[in-house]
């Protein structure tokens, strides 16, 4: 088969697909097109062709534009430049419609669930929301972002979606070529940045382990959510949108709907955000088991929840801890990584017969696969909310309610 890389041709753009692109067809092959919108007629240039039934391309000329097309506010959001944003060329409403279509399509195709989806926006608009950023350093020591599906660094002088105190306060400095910068602005407005360089003597999964060599601010970030203050590793996980933690915690609490004295599991618990909400519901007579595999996050959970004796923090991988003799849960909350929980974890949850499972998902495909497994094990998807916690990108956060089918 001829390699199309570098070739240009005209296509009619079809529906949106998961991953920040749309689907087109040319010469009996699928073309995944970035920088386009459904219904447009564009000229594309192929950027990647590994053979087989599909290739990848950028829309480099728009012949017939969608009425939802807008001018990207960032000069780096263009073909061949920064790969961080997927939908800067779409109106805010269109961005949410595209994400809703992806969630609905994944649920239909992977889980057999037909459901209309609405993606809800958060306060603050499309710009300057991202409070946590991973930057790359080019060979001249300048900060930037990687190009799409590439290790090539695009130097930048600012970032449209980054919160004040992230990119803007660091770009004028010179950094170690080849390093990465892990940056966070916490609820106090303080900037924390760790310069990470490859440790050539240590490798994990075939890649050099990154070690911090310079720190701006401190290693501890302060956040506020669910009516509590949190102290956590500045490099640790926390929702990047400033309103996301509160929005998700509120939704989890509503659907958990626990009673005093009941038992809940909080799986992939992080520093304990959802565990704190569940603990308030079950009260001192109840039990919340919070399971977290990242050692520093588990330590932070213990420290942050020290005033809640009903919370038991269990460090370790979820699939391993669930093999222990844990108290039988009335409700299970889980917030797995992007790959999802997987069949083993879902089967262990379903085998303990909780009445409800509240599933927080950052990837609609992984969510759909796990929903299908839950369905096979007696749990139906009864409600779903989706939130635009990552404006301008293809990412979307969902909260799903699964309830045990009557037997």
Image: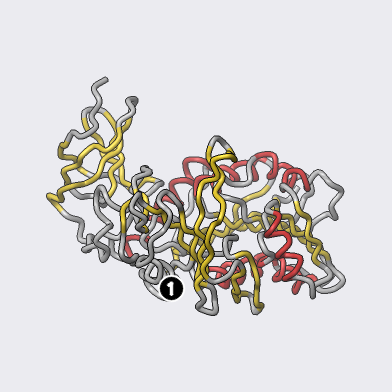
Residue placed under numbered mark 1 in the picture: 165
Instruction: Say whether residue 382 is left or right of residue 325.
Output: left
Q: Nearer the viewer, residue 406 or 330?
A: 330
How many numbered marks does the figure carry? Answer: 1
Q: How is the image coloured?
A: secondary structure
Dot 1, how many residues are within 10 Å of its Cα: few (below 14), some (14-19), or many (20+)?
some
Q: Residue at x 65, y 65 (%)?
A: 255
Q: Residue at x 52, y 42 (%)?
A: 112
Q: Quadrant of residue 271?
A: bottom right
Q: Residue at x 31, y 46 (%)?
A: 22
Kind of element beneath mark 1? loop
Residue 319: x percent and y percent? 73, 44
Residue 254: x percent and y percent? 64, 70
Q: Nearer the viewer, residue 201 or 286?
A: 201
Residue 258: x percent and y percent? 75, 68
Q: Residue at x 52, y 61 (%)?
A: 214
Instruction: Say whether residue 7 is left or right of residue 245.
Output: left
State which quarter of the image contains the N terminus: top left
Residue 358: x percent and y percent? 65, 58
């Amino acid at each position: 088969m001829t390699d199309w890389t570098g070739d240009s041709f005209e296509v009619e753009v079809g529906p949106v697909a998961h991953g920040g692109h749309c689907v087109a067809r040319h010469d009996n092959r699928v073309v995944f097109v970035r920088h386009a919108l459904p219904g447009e007629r564009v000229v594309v240039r192929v950027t990647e062709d590994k053979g087989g039934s599909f290739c990848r391309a950028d829309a480099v000329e728009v012949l017939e534009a969608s009425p939802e097309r807008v001018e990207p506010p960032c000069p780096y959001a263009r073909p061949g430049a920064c790969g961080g944003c997927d939908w800067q060329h779409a109106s805010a409403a269109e961005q949410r419609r595209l994400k809703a279509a992806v969630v609905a399509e994944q649920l239909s195709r992977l889980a057999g669930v037909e459901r209309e989806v609405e993606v809800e926006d958060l306060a603050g608009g499309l710009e300057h929301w991202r409070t946590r950023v991973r930057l790359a350093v080019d060979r001249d020591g300048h900060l930037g972002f990687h190009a799409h599906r590439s290790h090539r660094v695009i130097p930048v002088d600012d970032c449209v979606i980054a919160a004040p105190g992230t990119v803007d306060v660091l770009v004028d400095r010179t950094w170690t070529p080849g390093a990465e910068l892990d940056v966070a602005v916490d609820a106090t407005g303080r900037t924390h940045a760790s310069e990470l360089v490859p440790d050539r003597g240590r490798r994990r999964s075939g890649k050099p382990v990154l070690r911090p060599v310079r720190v701006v601010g401190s290693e501890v970030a302060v956040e506020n959510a669910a009516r509590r203050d949190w102290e956590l590793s500045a490099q640790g996980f926390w929702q990047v949108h400033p309103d996301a933690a509160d929005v998700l915690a509120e939704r989890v609490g509503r659907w958990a709907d626990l009673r005093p004295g009941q038992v809940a599991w909080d799986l992939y618990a992080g520093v304990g955000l959802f565990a704190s909400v569940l603990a308030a519901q079950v009260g001192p007579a109840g039990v919340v088991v919070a399971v977290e595999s990242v050692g520093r996050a588990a330590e932070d959970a213990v420290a942050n929840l020290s005033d809640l004796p009903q919370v038991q923090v269990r460090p370790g991988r979820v699939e391993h801890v669930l093999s222990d003799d844990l108290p039988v849960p009335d409700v299970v909350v889980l917030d797995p990584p992007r790959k999802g929980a997987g069949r083993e974890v879902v089967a262990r949850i379903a085998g303990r017969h909780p009445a409800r499972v509240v599933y927080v998902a950052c990837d609609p495909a992984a969510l759909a696969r796990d929903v299908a497994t839950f369905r096979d094990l007696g749990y139906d998807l009864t409600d779903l909310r989706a939130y635009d916690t990552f404006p301008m990108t293809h990412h979307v956060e969902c909260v799903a309610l699964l309830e045990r089918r009557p037997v």
